[in-house]
Amino acid sequence: MIQEEKSVLKKLLQHVIAIVCFLAVTLVYFSPVLDGKVLQQSDVQQYKGMSRELAQYYEKEGQSSAWTGSMFSGMPAYQIGIWGGAPNFLDYLEAPLKALGNSTSGPVFAGMLMAYILFCVMGVGFFPAVLGAIAYSLSSYNIIIIDAGHVTKAWAIAYMPLIVAGLAAAFRRKYLMAGLFMALGLALQIKNNHLQVTYYTGLLCVFIYLGLLINEIPKKNFSGLFKATAALVVGVAIAVLCNFGNIYANYEMSKESTRGQSELTQPTQSEKQSSGLDKEYAFAWSYGKMETLSLLIPDIHGGASGGILSPSSNLYKAIRTNAPQAQVDSAGIQAQTYWGDQPFTSGPVYFGAIICFLFVLGIFVIRHPMKWVLLVATTFFIFLSWGHNFELFNDWFFYHFPMYNKFRAVSTALVIPALTMLIVAAWGMKAFFSGEIKDEKLKRSLYISAGITGGISFLLWLAPGIFGFDFTSATDSQWISQVPDWYYSALVADRKDLLSSDALRSLIYIILAAGTLYAALKLKGDRNKITVYCSVVLILLVVIDLWGVDKRYLNNDKFQSKLSYDANRPFPQTEADKAILQDKHPSYRVLNLNNPFNETKTSYYHKSIGGYHAAKLKRYQELIDYRLQGEINSIIKSFDSQNIDSIIGSLQKNTALNMLNAKYIIFHPEQAPLQNPYAMGNVWFVNNYIFTENADKEIAALNTLDITTTAVVDKRFEDQLSGFTVVPDSTATIELTEYKPNALKYKSSAQSEQLAIMSEMYYPNGWEAYIDGKPATHFRADWTLRAIRIPAGQHEIEFKFEPHAYNTARAIASASSGLLILLLIGGIGSLFYKRKDKQSKA
């Protein structure tokens, strides 16, 4: 009993040491945060702009809104953020992790912790578990996305190992643990709302579950297989219920957003040609086949777009020689070093030379057939990441596999090999030190593994162009004509040098790792001590390797003082902003001519025509393609005349912008905005309406009709206007009297029944209309707007966003998350009870 207690304490101490190591690595890497500095992340900044209206509404009114009017003339806020409402108790469970730094060190530490749990459940041993956990979080992609501010993706990746730990526990017939880990890991991952990572995780789970079947069916362990399956299914069900609000919202938005199928027979360039996204859009960020060698050699394709070349580079020297008058930084020069297949990139996906070496070694030394399942899964997801570079494979998946065409940036699929290769690497490390394999086989496996990974590195070091590399990219054609020949020649030479240099770097790390394992076989003495010393060396080598590459993309220079950050973030008010904010009308919209559909600065202060979001409403995107972009281009062109009367006169033709109440136009942030006299206001009465038979005719009618007097209505809403004929009333009035993001009030006065058009987005799932407090029906008009019949007399009209189905789903999620916390506490308690009971019987 005393020995057992010592064993328990030893294991507990090991776990404490591991967690302290993870904290140390994370906090040292993000040490500027401890000094009060802040990381400027573009996506986080964009989020601040898109969410400000929702946050302010909650702070001032104490109420939550699931709709925002600050982007794209109005859209659901499900995928932006909803303050208040039914709580999700998983927030309290996550709080300690997010307290480390929600958008910086938090997901890095969480990833290490979750990966460590996975490797412990697998039983790979302490040192392989620590190595695998650190390598998982320090994989370059996980660091680069933090620099970019892809916070939800970072957290979703961090929780992936915990989900796989559930499957690993099922393998080891720990069914309670399997269910709890699956429920907790999946619930936390879904909660962080990056469905693409969750989708890939689900596909990985299918592979691993097939491995479970392969392992258990020959043993005829049908009872164990049933228990494992039941535990996992219950875990998945609980995770889904814990996020039922998010899941329902995503399901609803999948039909109404750009990820849904267009009703138009001829979608535009940015529209769909499948039941989801356009294939070219989805496959734009396809990883190159040879670029995949970046898993082993980071700068094989030049690293990041806009990389920094040192003063010793060919380009730096060429500029000094050929353009001595040019101003160049003494620390280096920025250039288009990346020459891969993607339009641009923030950096390569690098798993580590040592990890790649250990992965190959694991394939040779692991005896369990599960290694083949993991190898197939790794290959499968690499194929997915190739996108249009492997169309024979990926086209079938895009057009036939459920939901696959809802996601873009297929290079994201490499987050799965980042885990599967690590599982094999850590497992292989355990097998190597286990003493169960003869030394001769280990030596042979060691030679082959080092020969494969080191051989590739060696060849690329000596002959960088050996695989047909010419160090040029198709995207070079976009700017090559703007630079002299000597510039491009020097850049190509630098790209070649970057590859060669990193190939040598990877070769050195492979030699060091292989040498460490070779020494473990050759050294005489206590095998346990030799294993410990060699394992520690491997861990240090992995940390140094990955740390060095990660710091190329997220280093201390990227952080800035809090004072400087606050002065410039999220968006300082410009002169244009100040002028517009003098207008105290409840609601109007602003068009920023500077990249309007890829920024949220305007949304931070105003209700914007534009915005930044991957899942804007489908019909709004089509309005952008068919009308708005053309109107914006014509406004920009009119400024060439430098005649204010000509510019204002051109605004009269802007049907879409005027019906969206684009009252102000920002053409320069530090100049007064242009006021649009033709903006149609918040609401107006029309004298007539026409029905259209399909979407093509409906959107085309915006080009030919005067929508200030005539409404365009889809024939599906014909019953809403049955028997109604507009009797024009020149004395009729209607105006917006109160605006809240989820509630609008209007007052009307007319001598006869009228048809009112609101310059608000029609959305069928939640907006409800009331006239004098009584429910009324409304419908869609003018492609995207709301329309309603208003009786004669004086009335108060209200529109309220009341998504009852979503609210119910969120309440279910709240109750389910509370239940999961109780189950987790009960599960931990049962483990202690069983151990105590076992000790008392002993």
Image (cartoon, grey):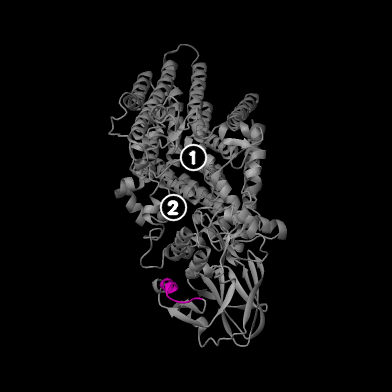
The numbered disc on residue 756 is: none
Our reading of the magenta stretch's main secondary structure is helix
- Check residue 569 for magenta coloring: no
| Relative image position of residue 420 (x, y in whole percent) | 43, 38
Q: Nearer the viewer, residue 514 or 464?
A: 464
Q: What amino acid type is highlighted by mark number 2?
A: Phe
Q: Secondary structure at mark 1?
A: helix
Q: What amino acid type is highlighted by mark number 1?
A: Ala
Which one is earlier in the sequence, the residue at label 2 or at label 1?
A: 1
Residue 68: name its quadrant.
Answer: bottom right
Q: Residue at x 52, y 54 (%)?
A: 612
- From the image, which quarter does the N terminus lie in? top right
Q: Nearer the viewer, residue 802 or 242?
A: 802
Query: Could you give the CA–CA distance between mark 2 and mark 1, rounded to whole angstroms?
Result: 28 Å
Q: Residue furthest top?
A: 524
| Relative image position of residue 708 (x, y in whole percent) | 52, 76
Can residue 172 be seen here? The reply is no
What residue is pinned by disc 1? Answer: 168
- Check residue 704 for magenta coloring: yes
Q: Which residues are magenta?
A: 698-707
| Relative image position of residue 818 (x, y in whole percent) | 65, 52
- Name the side, left or right, on which 650 lies relative to 773: left
What residue is pinned by disc 2? Answer: 407
- Name the side, left or right, on which 619 lies relative to 480: right
Residue 462: name its quadrant.
Answer: top left
Residue 48 to residue 767: above or below: above
Q: Secondary structure at mark 2?
A: loop
